[in-house]
Amino acid sequence: MAKILYLHGFASSANSTKANLINTFIKKNTKTTQILIPDLDNDIESAYHQIDLIIKKESPSSILGSSLGGFYATYFSDKYNLLCVNINPAVPPIDMSMYLGENQNFSTGEKFVINKHHLDLLETMSQKIQSLNRTKNFLTLIQSGDEVLDYKNTIKYFAASQVEIKFGGNHSFEDFEKYFTKIKRFLNLR
């Protein structure tokens, strides 16, 4: 059975709209695929170890990630040679300095702190994936109307891999479900 790991974005949860949509699609349209959608820890270092442990324990064949989850997906896909689909992902160099201090998870209401150590970890991760080792492993879905991340940086970073750009849209990625067949083909899901 193939396993997909879905990584939600910053201050989100496993109950996000995109996570629910892709989960429903996988369950209805594949026979031999399981999707894993963990609630990532808000603490960046804890999330890093959580993702690494899931990959080692569950051996997914691919990762899907959105926003900060896309950054994580890129890092771990490159590290473990996994197929990866990203949706409006954050790309190196990642700057989350505007979140230093206390934050609140949009989905759960949980409060958490981003500190300098977290930013340093993201910088270390960014340096390790300054350029991708396996560009053919990536499909990146981008909407130019993303109000959080500059889509031009994403295009430049993933230029050697498969990129799908929709002009307009937003950071939440409008009409995500219209890309499910393309995702299924790219990941060779059955």
Image (spheres, rainbow, N blue to C red):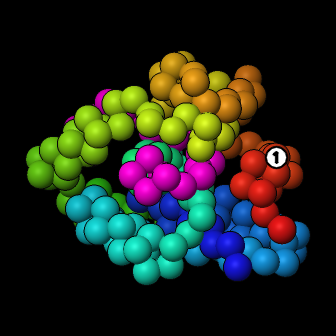
Give the residue displayed 64% in from the left and 25% down from the top. Answer: 144
- From the top left corner, tell me how far across and down residue 5 is, in percent: 56, 67
Q: Relative to 62, is 49 above or below?
A: below
* Element assignment for label 1: helix
Q: Relative to 92, is 73 above or below?
A: below
Does the segment drawn in magenta span residue 99? yes
Viewed as shown, does residue 80 lie left or right of 25?
left
Give the residue displayed 73% in from the left and 63% down from the top. Answer: 22
- From the top left corner, tell me how far across and down residue 92 is, in percent: 36, 32
Near mark 1 (Cα within 10 A), the count class, few <14, some 14-19 or many ≥20, is: few
Q: Which residues are magenta?
A: 77-100
Residue 146 appears anywhere in the view = no
**Type of the residue with mark 1:** Lys
Viewed as shown, does residue 112 lie left or right of 148?
left
Question: Which quadrant holds residue 98?
Answer: top left
Give the residue displayed 67% in from the left and 32% down from the top. Answer: 162
Question: Which quadrant holds residue 114?
Answer: bottom left
Tell me the quadrant of the picture where the C terminus can be found.
bottom right
